[in-house]
Structure formats: structure tokens, C-alpha cells
Image (cartoon, helix red, strand yellow):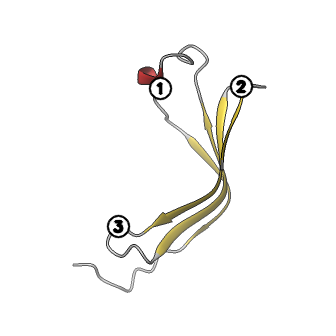
Amino acid sequence: EVNYNFYPTPRIKIKDVIINDLFDSKKTLIKVKNAVIRVSIKNLLAKEKHKFEKIELNNFEINFNFYESHI
């Protein structure tokens, strides 16, 4: 679910993000309940100029299993 807020600053809010392993798509690396990306008000209308330097993750779980080798 993706939402957009303009107040207090422009931001994109994403709920329930799941990032899977690059080598095995069945393995989940990160589960995030809420992610927030702040958008610059200067480049709000120019989609090509959006550069995200920071993503705020809230209520997340990271699952790294370093015992398995992908080589």
C-alpha cells in the first residue's frame, strides 16, 4: 500500500514491504511495516529530478543467515 502525504513535508509512505534474497527468491531478507521517503518540495513536480538519499524504516525485521554460501 502506497500513500502520499503533503503535510508537514511531502513524503511517500509505503506499508508492508518485503525484500527477498537475490539468489533465492523464496528467502525473505527484510520485512518492513512502514517505510517513509521524503520528497524535496523544490523538485516536487519534476519526477526526473527526484533523488532519494534517505529512507526511514519503522518496525522492521532483518533476517541475515551468513552460514549459507551462495558461491
In this rendering, position of residue 71 left or right of residue 43:
left
Q: Which of the two discs, 1 and 2, labels the residue nearer the N terminus?
A: 2
Marking on residue 7: none
Q: Residue at x 40, y 80 (%)?
A: 66
Mark 3 crowdedness (10 Å alpha carbons): few <14, some 14-19, many ≥20:
few
Percent position (x, y) of residue 33? 68, 59
Look at label 2 and name its amino acid: Thr
Tell which of 9 and 12 is nearer to you: 12
Label 1–label 2 contact, CB within 8 A: no
Percent position (x, y) of residue 10? 67, 26
Percent position (x, y) of residue 40? 58, 22
Q: Residue at x 21, y 78 (%)?
A: 71
Look at label 3 and name its amino acid: Leu
In this rendering, position of residue 9 left or right of residue 68:
right
Q: Which of the two discs, 3 and 2, labels the residue nearer the N terminus?
A: 2
| Element under disc 1 | loop
In this rendering, position of residue 30 left or right of residue 66:
right
Look at label 1 and name its amino acid: His
Residue placed under numbered mark 3 in the picture: 22
